[in-house]
Image (tube, rainbow, N blue to C red):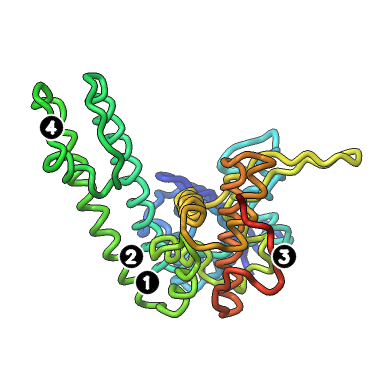
Amino acid sequence: MYHCGIDLHSRITVYHLLDGAGTTLARGEIDTSEASLGELARGIKKHTRFYIEASTGSAWCARLIEACGHQAVVVDPNRLRAISSSPKKTDAHDAEMLAMLGKTGLLTPVHVRSEFTDRFRRLLAARHAIVGSRANLIRTTRSLLRSEGHNLPSCDGDDFARRLEGTWGIPEGYELAVPPLVQAIDDMTTQVLEIEKAVHEVAEADPTTVRRLRAIPGVGELIATSFLALIEDPTRFRSSEEIAAYTGLAPWVNSSAGKRKPGGITKRGNSATRALLVQGAWAHVRSKKDTALKRWYYKLSERVGKKKAIVGLARKLGELMWTLWKNEADYQAFPTSSRRVPAPT
């Protein structure tokens, strides 16, 4: 078997090919395109294992290589100290190190997403970006109107443009500044609703699992499907702690000389899903249903404050969703294994 290290970039890809004895057979640069990568893979006649650092394009590259009859191994860049801490940091050296470490079995492989999951996650990422841009425009519009004493009532982002053009009305003197903002907000709302229709179609493909997750107060169709797309296969995680780490909601821990100093959350992984989990945590707290998680949140917030407590609740929501999914279990507001914390007065 041959071994090939791939240093993948947006425009240029550097490769380094070794034989079974570790002798260099080929090295070079190619364009990062389906045609060039396919030509490279098809040009190697012996079965080859390609090693690629996990990145934005790694899943696409891995699927392309495997379609050409070879094996693709996507590796965790956070565990490649031999590359990241090397005094010699070039693309050619990184590709060579990937091939050498892969040949000796010292690389840690990661899960490669399916093409369907990749497409769906791109859809969620687009929604996340549009919602963020819309929120900025809404804040700008409110600020402009507030400068003349026009304080608008609170409302959902989906309803803002309609209410401002209808019930609230645009005050005199803002005919030039505000309408373009409102039009942009309205267009973005239409795009968000179109994406959410596509999300609903995905949810209908696995109605049983989505129903289980949506039974949790605060977890809607969007949060459930986003979580399913992020995890993809619940059996690849051994514990709920791994889910917390994968979603970036686990804290940094610095333990030395018998002293343990926890820090903020790592924020690793998909930021859009992490933001949705936090939104779900707030919705869980605001729901009218009494739950063990809500009582846990109130007790924790007295000690660390609401902001830190809500992040902890978001972590527990992710862990709970994974547990229900993996065990095919139904949600219980007060699991028999949990201790009942007195409700806040």
Identify the mark nearer the N-term, 4 or 1. Answer: 4
Identify the mark nearer the N-term, 2 or 3. Answer: 2
In the image, residue 279 above or below residue 90: below
User: In this view, which residue lies farthest toward the front?
Assistant: 345
Relative horizontal placement of residue 265, taking residue 259 as reference (left or right)? left
Whether label 4 touches label 1, CB < 8 Å = no
Return the x and y of residue 291 as percentages of the image width and height. Answer: 57, 63
Indicate the secondary structure of the residue bearing disc 1.
Answer: helix
In the image, 100 versus 328, the foreground residue is 328
Identify the mark nearer the N-term, 1 or 3. Answer: 1
Tell me the CA gap for discs 2 and 4: 33 Å
Q: Which residue sits at x=26%, y=64%? A: 197
Q: Which label is found at residue 203?
A: 1
Whether label 2 touches label 1, CB < 8 Å = yes
Residue at the spot of label 2:
199
Kind of residue sitting beneath label 3: Arg
Residue at the spot of label 4:
170
Residue at the spot of label 3:
339
Tell me the CA gap for discs 2 and 1: 6 Å
Kind of residue sitting beneath label 4: Ile
Residue 248 visible in the shown view: yes
Tell me the CA gap for discs 4 and 1: 38 Å
In the image, 30 versus 129, the foreground residue is 129
Residue 5 visible in the shown view: no
Q: Quadrant of residue 35?
A: bottom left
Q: Which label is found at residue 155?
A: none
Kind of residue sitting beneath label 1: Ala
Return the x and y of residue 146 as percentages of the image width and height. Answer: 26, 24
Return the x and y of residue 90 as percentages of the image width and height. Answer: 59, 38
Identify the mark nearer the N-term, 2 or 4. Answer: 4
Query: Quick one: label 1, few (<14), some, or many (20+) residues within 10 Å?
Result: many
